[in-house]
Amino acid sequence: MSNSARPVTSVAHGLQLGADGGKASNHPLTVNPPTRSIPSPAEVARLAASIAPPSGWRLIVAKISHLWLVALLLLIWEFASIVAVRSSPQIGVMLPPPTAIYSAAKELLARGELVPNIVASLTRVLTAVGVAAAIGVPLGLIMGWTPRFRVAIDPLIEFIRPIPPLAWIPLSILWFGIGNVQVDFIIFLAAFFPIVLSSMAGARDVDVYLLRAGLSMGARRGDLFRTVVFPAALPMVFTGLRVGLGIGWMALVAGELVAAPSGLGYMINNARTLFRSDIILLGMVLIGVLGLVLDIVIRQISRYLMPWYNRQ
Amino acid sequence: MAHLEVEHVSKIHITRKGDPFLALHDVNIQVGKNEFFSIVGPSGCGKTTLLNLIAGFEKPSLGEIRVDGELITEPGWERAVVFQEYALFPWYTIFENVCYGLKRKRVPKAEQKELAEHYIQLVGLARFKTRFPRELSGGMRQRVSIARALAVNPSILLMDEPFGSLDIQTREYMQDELLKIWQCEPKTVIFVTHSIDEAIKLSDKIAIMASSPGRVAEIKVVETERPRDPTDSTMVRLAVEVKEWLRTQISMAEQAAVEAASPVARG
């Protein structure tokens, strides 16, 4: 054990044992003040500024700089298409350049054909998924909460669910003819099952301690459902709605491709008969973009309705 | 007639494999009005099961539990519970959480506000009443949990290892706060803990439980005036006695388990 007169410093900044070093058992710990004075608010602000994230144009650059690969691929595509057209017109039809998509958009806008088709598709998906949610969410919640009800309905659901929505197309045409109702029906089927199953899981898996807390505060069946089960299940309900909307959107496109009087699928099909591959690609891009937008919108809605929820 | 009477209560659980398991055997407890009654014991001795039975979340397989002579059939605000995991409703603010029980009791709005604010103030969280539980620390959440249980003015306050999830400093602070609140607004408290020091510091009576099967081995009375000095000789002797006893219990249980699993026992 060292006997030097040098005080022993511990790892803790400013904390020193008694000056006799090592023989501290009878000495109280002394805490020395920090060797640097506490910075003034101005100094703290300056320090913060030096580590601040970028703002202004630097921020924009930071946010889009990872898209360099996408931009590069678009350029290669553009170049390849132009070269291909020069060598053979047939290839030009098969893969138009990205710029052709843009001019197709301008053309259809001018002819007033673009917006009505977009609106038609969006209205269709929102109505059909809306109906699926209106029926599916309450049904799923009640199934999750009431075991007797669940075991009765479950076999029906498990039997119908594996049948792909598109397999219903022939029957739905027989029932509803070709038109909006028929396509709506297909979308409804596609969105219904994820919504029901998610809502059911949400209601079934409520934290037992939350249920007990409600019970010990005197909440009973209906009250307990409204104030505990429903809010607790809401995150799962929204997951179901997101998935249902996504699958519904895909079913919409397929349904419109097969038989529909309007919409983006109809627009693509029409373009195919006219060998307008630029319009086909435009339609596909719009489908992708709108699908993404719908997902973002529903995520924002869920964030607004559930301010308490900590997403993992 | 005692305030809470647990008479010859046994509880059998069926395990996942279908085997019956005797969780509690012939438990007899009498708790007087406004008594602070702790239940201590090693893990698995059935103290939480006993609390669940008193709360009404489960029914005893044998025996009866009575409050003021009336049989317990279901949970209710007369036996409000404070859980170890807080169990606060994340979609309600602190204020709404504390109001929850009052709403179930159909208390008029103005009185709800008054009572909720009183108890939020009592646990020292008046500044946070519009916050959500996720914005609060563990100790703060537990205080809200206590306020919520107190707000409904239960005749028995049930606490299941309420300070178990807290660090030692916060835990000791909360123990003092709880005592202050309890001395200010006396209630019968059933307090489950595995900390003997905590039980000795807080309680009038301590039920010491053993496991396999879960049963009450002894009920010790602590008569010292509060606040209690843990270095006082009576306290120290009691603590040593109880800890010694529990240690023997645990080693006996472990020996029994080893013997049951040995090839000789299986024949």
Image (spheres, coloured by chain):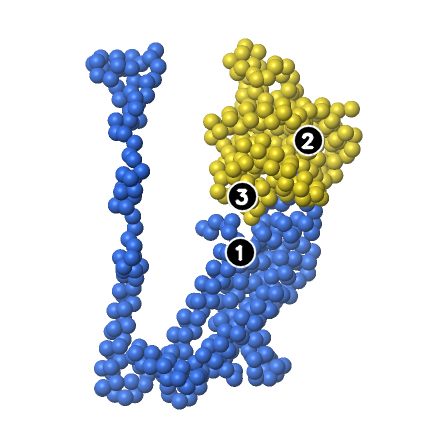
Front of the two marks 1 and 2:
1
Q: Where is residue B89, by image quadrant?
A: top right
Relative to A70, is B76 above or below?
above
Tell me if label 1 and label 2 are in contact, CB under 8 Å.
Answer: no
Q: Residue at x 29, y 57 (%)?
A: A56
Q: Which residue is mark 1?
A: A305
**Residue at screen point 37% across, 80% down:** A105
Which label's residue is closer to the chain start, 2 or 3?
3
Q: What's the amino acid at mark 1?
A: Leu
Front of the two marks 3 and 1: 3
- Neighbour tally class for label 1: few under 14, some 14-19, many 20 plus, Cα within 10 Å: few
Three-letter code for the amino acid on which mark 2 is drawn: Ile
Q: Amino acid at mark 3?
A: Thr
Q: Relative to residue A301, is residue A60 drawn left or right?
A: left
Neighbours of disc 2 within 10 Å: few (<14), some (14-19), many (20+): many
Residue B19 drawn at (x, y percent): 64, 40
The residue pinned by badge 2 equals B156
Q: Secondary structure at mark 2?
A: strand
In the image, the chain rendered in yellow is B
Number of other residues with Cα within 10 Å of mark 3, as a class: few under 14, some 14 to 19, many 20 or more: few
Most foreground residue, B245 or B259: B245
Residue for point 67% across, 27% down: B187
Residue labelled with disc 3: B130
Do circles 3 and 1 both sit on a common chain? no
For the colour blue, the matching chain is: A
